[in-house]
Image: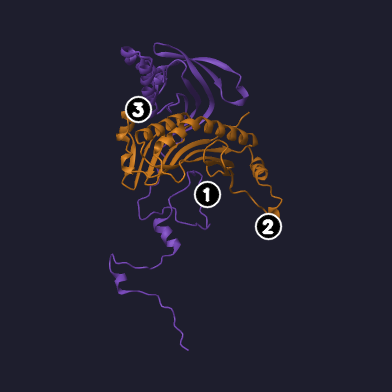
Amino acid sequence: MQKLPQLRGLTLAMVGDFNPTIFQPKCSSENLLTVEEADSANVQVIHPDVTSFGLPWITLTVQRERFEVTCAAQPYFERVAGLVSQTFELLRHTPIRLMGINNEAHYRASSIDGWHSIGDTLAPKKFWTEVFPSPGLQSITIRQIPRTDDLDGYRQVTIEPSVKTTPGVYIAINDHFVIGGQEVLGATKAIEVLRTKWSDSVAFTECVFSKFSELL
Amino acid sequence: MSVRIAQKKEPTSAKQIGAFHDISLRKERIQAAFGEAPNSTDSDTNPSVVSTTMVPRPPHPRGIRLIPPPTDNLMIGFVTEQRWQGYVTAIEGDKFHVVVYDTSLEYEDEVEEVEFECQEVATLMRPLIVPGAILFWDIGFQVEPSGQRLRQSIVSFPMIPFDTKEERLQARARARARFQELGWGKTSENGTEQSQESA
């Protein structure tokens, strides 16, 4: 039986040039947040350097060069993607250089032995036992570069011991897109990439999580 | 033989505000204040315990700025026990029928028909309930910030638009041009509206 993650997270991150003050819950279109949601938002700061507010299902943080939306409930992931794409369709002249679809999961290991065996599978200890008496895997990142589609960027998977679940494993997938390279493009290109690659990214994520859950 | 020791040139004007000076700054110091723009879109919600690992450059460069405050963990989480994907087959009043299949590999061949009430869908997603629309159905536990787990059934629809406003305008312009080519004249307005819907 496939093992279920204890926690799932999605972070959509964009790197570019942003104006944090225009990202406010009450300034959003009615297609993005309901009036009740906008009114109940937990606004932490709205300042030219940084805006940060939260709703029960997302946390949004915008700095001058980074935009980030985080969600920890899988049923809302589609809504997060819709929120981001529709926001930047409105703000389509915002320069965006990079975009990342980050999926994370914390899995509980069935036993301590099973937990160690994952580390041994991903990073065999034969070499390390000559250096350390008791080596352990802290973090491993495998990156596919260039991407296998026709876009610039990479895909990477990071495995670490979970800090939320003990014994557990943390898996992070960064689907990273370079938007326009040296050329500064508006958000239109980023939104097009998000629209066309979102489903593919979700499928890849589920495939990776499924593969790791078999190890646990 | 006299030896001249190179002395750093420090003109008096260098101490004046706004005056030109050529004092070289170390790369580390420049990075600390005006470091490179971030080039990673990675996120990390699994921060490692306090370590003494060397940090090559400060985490918040680019001058003196406010940084995001630590976020209170007020977000809900969700532990999905089972997830189905499907599509709407029919709408009857305030109910709609869907065909769903399990997304887990073990039960992927199982197809079921389910009836939902429109009110089970979030307000913003209700306009998306149309025959043929794709949807997801999750059953699991919603984890409240307090840690309490509530059993939930959540129906959600993909909200990424298939086309952008610009693409819709382009499609409308193409349709209008095509109608003019065909010489459909007065009916072009109706035809354009029809093509908008199909676009």
Q: Quadrant of the C terminus of chain B?
A: top left
How packed mark 2 is, by other alpha carbons closer than 10 Å (few <14, some 14-19, many 20 or more), is few
Q: Residue furthest top?
A: B92
Q: Which residue is pictured at 55% across the width and 43% down the height?
A: A162
At label 3, the amino acid type is Asn
Q: Chain of mark 2?
A: A
Q: Chain of mark 1?
A: B
How did the renderer colour the structure? by chain
Which residue lies under the disc numbered 3? A31
Quarter of the image for residue B106 reads top right
Q: Colour of chain B?
A: purple
Residue B69 location, x and y as percent?
38, 47
How packed mark 3 is, by other alpha carbons closer than 10 Å (few <14, some 14-19, many 20 or more), is some
Regarding mark 3 in the picture, which secondary structure is present there?
loop
Which residue lies under the disc numbered 2? A131
Residue A165 visible in the shown view: no
Q: Which residue is pictured at 35% across the width and 20% down the height?
A: B176
The residue lying toward the viewer, choosing from A108 and A88, is A88
Q: Which residue is pictured at 35% across the width and 17% down the height?
A: B180
How packed mark 1 is, by other alpha carbons closer than 10 Å (few <14, some 14-19, many 20 or more), is few
The residue lying toward the viewer, choosing from A161 and A158, is A158
Residue A132 location, x and y as percent?
67, 56
Task: Look at the picture and state if A205 lies above or below A127.
Answer: above
Q: Tell me the orange chain.
A: A
Q: Which mark is residue B182?
A: none
Mark 1–mark 2 distance (CA, rounded to whole Å): 23 Å
Mark before the other along the chain sequence, 3 or 2:
3
At label 1, the amino acid type is Ser
Q: Which mark is residue B48?
A: 1
